[in-house]
Structures are given as C-alpha cells and as structure tokens.
C-alpha cells in the first residue's frame, strides 16, 4: 500500500512521520502507515462492520502487517476509540523521554493497559493481550 497519504499529511504539518500516529481499521491502511514509517500505528476494531465474532481475527490481522513491505503492523489494536487519548499521551511521553525506544518501536503498553476502558490486542512481548 502506498504511503503517500501519510507522507503528505506529515509534510503538510511539518512533522516527521516517526512523530505521527495513524489509526486504521484495514490491512491496507496499516500497510500504508507502516510503509510511511509512522511512529505509532493504532489498529481499530470497534467499527460496526467488524462483527463481535471477528474481533480477534481482525485484530491479529492488523497486528501482523502483512500488507506493508517492511512487515510493520499495528502496534496496538483498540476496540474503544475513547482509549485513544491514553495511547497518544503515552506515545508523546515516550517520544520525549525515551526517543530511542520509539525509533525501535519498543512500546510497553502494559503501563497503560489498566487505564483503558475496553479490550486491546498487543504484539507478543508488548504487554500481552487484554
């Protein structure tokens, strides 16, 4: 998937893609964000087109990043969009305090999981699934 939309948006705001956050509910969208090297990619499974019985499979697909050329998938997947500000603040804190961890996509979401309203899905080693 073409990263141009993310690169154009980052350029328009004068921000490096690595400092940006993408929220996507499709494999192609996650692939575009991954190919643009967006700093934090949040998958979303709370939309009405994703049935309750498909949540786990859809979240796993977003985390996988099969459509990105570099293998980058969603860093975390949310079910409730109201949880997004918690992740944005966590990413901002981490980017200011430990930028090398952001650059390495070394996110430890276990520190914010207890604050989330609803379920989330994580890559192995990133704090486990909740």
Image: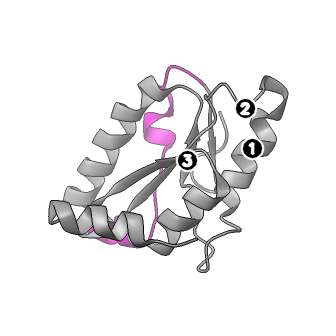
Q: Is mark 2 on a helix, strand or loop?
A: loop
Residue farthest to the top? Answer: 117
Which is in the foreground here, disc 2 or disc 3? 2
Instruction: Please report whichever mark, 2 or 3, sits nearer to the chain's N-terminal start.
Output: 2
Image quadrant where residue 18 sits: bottom left
Residue range highlighted in magenta: 98-118
Q: Mark 1 points at which residue?
A: 58
Dot label at residue 105: none
Q: What element carries label 3?
A: strand
Q: Mark 2 points at which residue?
A: 50
- CA separation in Å, label 2 and label 3: 17 Å
The answer to if 29 sits in the magenta stretch is no
Against 5, residue 108 (above or below) is above
For residue 122, side relative to residue 10 (left or right): right
Residue placed most toward the observer, 88 or 1: 1
Residue at horizontal 67 percent and vertical 40 percent from the top: 129
Q: Can residue 84 be seen in this view?
A: yes
Q: Is residue 115 visible?
A: no
The answer to if 102 sits in the magenta stretch is yes
Residue at horizontal 30 percent and vertical 68 percent from the top: 8
Residue placed most toward the observer, 65 or 28: 28
Image marks 3 and 1: residues in contact by CB distance under 8 Å: no
Against 48, residue 71 (above or below) is below
Instruction: Please report whichever mark, 3 or 1, sits nearer to the chain's N-terminal start.
Output: 1
């Amino acid at each position: 998937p073409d990263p141009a939309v993310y690169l154009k948006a980052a350029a328009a705001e004068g921000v490096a893609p690595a400092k940006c956050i993408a929220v996507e509910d499709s494999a192609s969208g996650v692939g575009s964000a991954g190919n643009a090297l967006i700093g934090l990619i949040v998958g979303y499974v709370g939309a009405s087109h994703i049935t309750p019985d498909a949540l786990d499979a859809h979240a796993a697909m977003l985390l996988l990043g099969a459509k990105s050329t570099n293998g980058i998938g969603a860093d975390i997947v949310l079910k409730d969009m109201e949880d997004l500000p918690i992740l944005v603040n966590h990413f901002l804190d981490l980017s200011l305090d430990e930028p090398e961890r952001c650059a390495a996509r070394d996110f430890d979401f276990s520190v914010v999981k207890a604050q989330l309203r609803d379920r989330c899905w994580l890559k192995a080693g990133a704090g486990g699934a909740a």
